[in-house]
Amino acid sequence: MKLKIDTEILVEEFFEDTCLFGIVAPVKDYLFSWNINQILGFNFKINHSMEIQLRKKERNYFFSIYEYVVPGCPLIHYLYNNQNDGEYLLPEFKHLDYLWLAKGEEMKKNEINTLQQSIKLLPLVQLVTEMTNDKIKNKQYLIF
C-alpha cells in the first residue's frame, strides 16, 4: 500500500490567514530587502534553510526567501524571489519579480491596504498587486 500526501489539504492549510502581493521591482533581492528594511522599518533577513529548489530542464533553480518575524505577534512576512536565471517560481506570473506573503495572523482590510500602499511608495517598486489564491496555479511552489 502506497501512502500519498494530499497536497490540496497541505496547500489549503498553508494559505489560511495569509495575504499575498505580487511586486514588480527589477532590482536584486538583497537591494530590495535592504530598501524595505530602511524605508519601511522591517527587518527582513534571508533564510537559506527556506530556499526553494525547483528542477526544470535538467537543472536546479534556487529561489531565495527573506523572512521577517513581527515581534510579539504570530505574524510573519516572507519575501520570495520569483526569478532565478531565466526561470520563475510562479511561471504564470513571469512579470512579477517578488511575492510578499504575510502569514500567521489574519490581517484586517485596512492593514492590508496600508501595507500595499507603503510598498508602492518604495522608489524601486513599479507595481504592487494583491493576489488571490485561486489565481495561482502553482501554489505548492510557495510552500516551504
Image: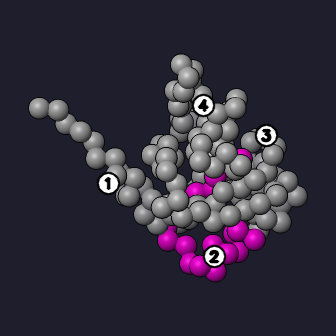
* Picture disc at residue 111: 2
Distance of label 3 from label 1 (alpha carbons) = 34 Å
Which is more N-terminal, label 1 or label 3? Answer: 1
- As for residue 99 lying within the magenta part, the answer is yes
Disc 1 is placed on an element classified as helix
Q: Which mark is residue 9?
A: 1
Labels 2 and 3: the sequence-earlier one? 3
Q: Are marks 2 and 3 in contact (CB under 8 Å)?
A: no
The quadrant in which the N terminus is found is: top left
Q: Residue at x 56, y 78 (%)?
A: 108
Q: Is residue 89 above or below residue 75?
A: above
Mark 3, mark 1: which one is toward the viewer? 1
Counting from the top left corner in percent of width and height, residue 61 is at 60, 28
Which one is earlier in the sequence, the residue at label 4 or at label 2? 4
Where does the image place residue 123, in percent across and percent down from the top left?
Answer: 88, 58
> What's the CA distance linking mark 4 and mark 3?
14 Å
